[in-house]
Amino acid sequence: EAAALLVIPASALICTFSDIALFAWTRDGELAARVSPVLSILSAGFGLNALLFVPYHRQLALGITRYAIAINTLAVVVFLPSLVSLTQAYGAIGAALCWLLLNLGYFAIGLPWVFSRLFPTELGRWMAHSVVRPTLAVGVVTLTAAWLAPPAALASQAAAIVFLCAVWVGASCAALAAMPALRDRILAGLFLG
């Protein structure tokens, strides 16, 4: 759950506000407008990849590498030709889309396959508590912020940074609220530690 608390708000923020994030970084609105679709897709792919980090390393910590080898071998066989064809057809958007599709494959196919063999009773709980609930909570905050986003968020670099930080804090609080076990551990550590 701690990984989800770090990953989901950041990924959702960049996916939703890639243009504002790029503007805050480069101060170039034209560049931000051109590159933001690629960054949004890449951020979604990296978010999924980061959510897979803990289950993947748990598997490796148990000394079980055969599933990772099998999944990654299949991924390379599918990913490389897809990367070439999508990049040739759609440029940078195609390459970013390939990254997202690779991680969707890991998430939708590889993760359940490994969980069913190594941790058969944990997939539903992990998905509900560490993925679905915080993602829905963060989605409400980021989509509401996108709907209410003031045009002034792109008026200056400082305004963009303040806006992004405010949305990130709100999204992180929403994610934490959606994960009661983690929230209780954090609050106990703050007030009892």
Image (cartoon, rainbow, N blue to C red):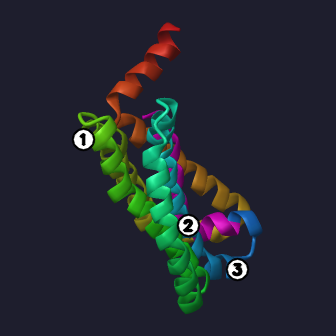
Magenta region: which residues? 1-23
Marks 3, 2: nearer the viewer: 2
Q: Earlier in the sequence, mark 1 or mark 3?
A: 3
Residue identified by numbered label 2 = 42
Tell me which numbered mark, 1 or 2, is placed earlier along the sequence: 2
Position of residue 193 relative to residue 122, above or below, is above
Report which residue position mark 3 lands on: 31
Q: In which quarter of the image is residue 115?
A: top left
Instruction: Give percent across and percent down for residue 73.
Output: 50, 61
Q: Which amino acid does label 3 sit on?
A: Leu
Is 118 left, or right, of 167 in this rendering?
Answer: left
Mark 3 or mark 2: which comes first in sequence?
Answer: 3
Q: Can residue 170 be seen in this view?
A: no
Q: How crowded is mark 3: few (under 14 residues within 10 Å), some or many (20 or more)?
A: few
- Left or right: residue 95 versus residue 113 is right
Secondary structure at numbered mark 3: helix
The outermost residue toward the bottom is 89
Q: Along the line of sight, which residue is nearer the eye, 64 or 146?
A: 64
Residue in view at x 48 percent, y 8 percent: 192
Identify which residue is drawn at 40% across, 62% down: 104
Are discs 1 and 3 less than 8 Å apart at CB?
A: no
Crowding at mark 1 (Cα within 10 Å: few <14, some 14-19, many 20+): few
Q: Mark 1 points at which residue?
A: 124
Circles 3 and 2: CB atoms closer than 8 Å? no
Q: Is residue 181 above or below residue 83?
A: above
Which residue reaches farthest top? 192
The location of residue 163, given as percent across then percent down, is 58, 56
Q: Where residue 146 sits in the image (x, y, percent)?
A: 45, 65
> Is residue 121 rendered magenta in the image?
no
Query: Residue at 49% across / 12% down in the picture?
Result: 191
- Front residue of this view, candidates 85 and 44: 85
